[in-house]
Image: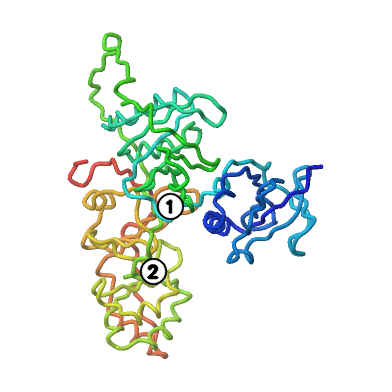
């Protein structure tokens, strides 16, 4: 049985990150000692984090402001479990380990990465290739899209084998997406602006602004396995390591232009946009009675409505600002807060996307308008495709289908009359993906 030692238990990664920063102020030496780190299975949610400084003579003090969030216990490791024998009653017991414990030389390495809140804009990117074949493929892909501004060095991977690190000041989005494909032996990093820290693509490090104080090394790579330091030397321009054999390899035009099929998709946006169009299913249309009762007459006049139906499917009521961005005041937005909200995309006529989303990958407005077939005669709604499908679900509604809100109010007010509803059969409703390389209406690319 392993020797009993002191363990610090943290409910989540955020608490651990706060503790590391506070600990650096109280006793910085505690950071640079050897720590054993374990993830504990608590049955639901993210694992509990357990850290032990071992049986060193110098104790570690928990900052006062975090003592209520961190539990100090006594326990030992035993066959894939942490047995807590002393400590707060709610913490004593036996915990199964999610994975074997790891030992780090700095406690900050135990802080897990977390998903980034938004994709950085045009960051510097580094690609760590675990094989020479992957390195050569990466160089070829960058050169194929006209990006020769590359630097390369070799590093020792986690297993001690030689690996290649390729740094690009500007990297093509297509090259990044290819490198992220399952099966590729590549890890992609992005550089946090203003720092020497490079974090695994799609993630961010809670301590990134504090890591700079922990050393003067030129490049810090942080991924899900921890971090590694690359010294500021040994970098070479990729042109210095390329070899060309002009005699044996001759390329001739083929007359065919290769195309890359890329699926348009909805991506989360960093801040919620203000909706300009709302959609209610037919069974909730009766809610309009309460909605309209809470609005002033001028607010009602600022809305137009249309009935929508996907072939023989359910019907929906669409409410839209008569003048996008200026018709609906705070009272309207509050009254319609439970409806599905869509925001008008600036610069693209009639295009509406869910208020919390944007269309990716980023395209020039005129190119996206051509791909989506936007028209001043239509209002276009974009949604997620059905499960198991790629691309976007597109709904087109003729502008002429929208009527003043007053017409709907009159119908609902006539309790003894047959409601008059105009059912729109959209001219083009579907979920087919768009190929952004397809020719536009004018035949151009």
Q: Mark 1 or mark 2: which is in front?
A: 1
**Residue labelled with disc 2:** 341
Of callouts 1 and 2, which one flags the residue occurring earlier in the amino acid sequence? 1
Please, which residue is most extreme toward the front here? 57
Q: Quick check: 375 above or below 161?
A: below
Residue 431 position within the rendered picture, expressed as x and y whole percent measured from the top left:
40, 53
Q: Quick check: 2 above or below 380?
A: above
Residue 290 position within the rendered picture, expressed as x and y whole percent measured from the top left:
43, 86
Please, which residue is most extreme toward the left here? 442
Residue 294 is drawn in which quadrant?
A: bottom left
For this rendering, which residue is in front, 368 or 444?
368
**Residue labelled with disc 1:** 209
Q: Quick check: 342 above or below 437?
A: below
**Residue at the location (34% across, 74% down)?**
319
**Residue at the location (40% across, 58% down)?**
383
Q: Residues within 10 Å of mark 2 (few under 14, many from 20)?
A: many
For this rendering, which residue is in front, 373 or 149?
149
| Image quarter in which the N terminus is found | top right
- Disc 1 is placed on an element classified as helix
Residue 220 position within the rendered picture, expressed as x and y whole percent measured from the top left:
45, 40
Please, which residue is most extreme toward the top here? 247
Residue 100 position within the rendered picture, expressed as x and y whole percent measured from the top left:
68, 41
How many callouts does the rendering have?
2
Describe residue 393's horizontal placement relative to residue 55 as left or right: left
- Disc 2 is placed on an element classified as strand
For this rendering, which residue is in front, 79 or 286?
79
| Image quarter in which the C terminus is found | top left
Q: Disc 1 and disc 2: Cα gap in Å?
A: 36 Å
Q: Residues within 10 Å of mark 1 (few under 14, many from 20)?
A: few
Describe residue 376's horizontal placement relative to residue 54 as left or right: left
**Residue at the location (27% across, 9% down)?**
247
């Amino acid at each position: 049985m392993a020797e009993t030692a002191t363990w610090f238990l943290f409910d989540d990664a955020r608490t651990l990150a706060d503790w590391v920063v506070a600990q650096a102020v109280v006793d910085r030496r505690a950071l640079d000692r050897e720590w054993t780190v374990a993830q504990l299975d608590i049955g639901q949610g993210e694992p509990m984090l357990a850290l032990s400084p071992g049986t060193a003579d110098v104790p570690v003090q928990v900052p006062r402001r975090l003592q209520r969030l961190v539990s100090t216990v006594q326990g030992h490791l035993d066959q894939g479990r942490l047995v807590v024998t002393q400590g707060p009653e709610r913490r004593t017991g036996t915990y199964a380990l999610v994975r074997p414990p790891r030992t780090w030389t700095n406690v900050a390495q135990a802080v897990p990465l977390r998903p980034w809140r938004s994709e950085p804009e045009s960051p510097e990117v580094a690609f760590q290739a675990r094989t020479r074949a992957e390195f050569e493929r990466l160089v070829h892909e960058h050169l194929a899209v006209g990006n020769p501004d590359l630097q390369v060095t070799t590093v020792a991977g986690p297993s001690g084998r030689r690996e290649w690190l390729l740094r690009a000041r500007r990297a093509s989005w297509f090259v990044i997406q290819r490198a992220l494909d399952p099966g590729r032996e590549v890890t992609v990093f992005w550089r946090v602006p203003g720092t020497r820290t490079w974090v695994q693509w799609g993630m961010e490090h809670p301590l990134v602004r504090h890591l700079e104080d922990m050393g003067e090394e030129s490049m810090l790579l942080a991924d899900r396995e921890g971090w590694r330091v690359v010294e500021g030397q040994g970098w070479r321009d990729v042109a210095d390591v390329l070899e060309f054999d002009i005699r044996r390899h001759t390329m001739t035009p083929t007359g065919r232009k290769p195309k890359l099929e890329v699926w348009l998709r909805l991506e989360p946006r960093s801040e919620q946009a203000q909706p300009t169009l709302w959609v209610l299913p037919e069974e909730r249309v009766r809610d309009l009675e309460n909605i309209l009762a809470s609005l002033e007459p001028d607010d009602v006049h600022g809305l137009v409505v249309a009935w929508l139906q996907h072939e023989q499917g359910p019907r929906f009521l669409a409410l839209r600002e008569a003048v996008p961005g200026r018709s609906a005041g705070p009272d309207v937005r509050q009254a319609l807060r439970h409806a599905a909200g869509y925001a008008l995309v600036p610069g693209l006529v009639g295009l509406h996307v869910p208020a919390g989303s944007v269309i990716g990958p980023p395209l020039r407005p005129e190119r996206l308008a051509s791909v989506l077939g936007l028209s001043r005669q239509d209002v276009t709604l974009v949604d997620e495709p059905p499960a198991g499908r790629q691309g976007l679900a597109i709904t087109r509604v003729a502008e002429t289908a929208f009527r003043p809100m007053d017409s709907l109010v009159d119908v609902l007010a006539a309790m003894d009359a047959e409601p008059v509803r105009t059912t729109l059969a959209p001219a083009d409703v579907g979920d087919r993906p768009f190929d952004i390389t397809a020719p536009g209406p004018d035949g151009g690319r």
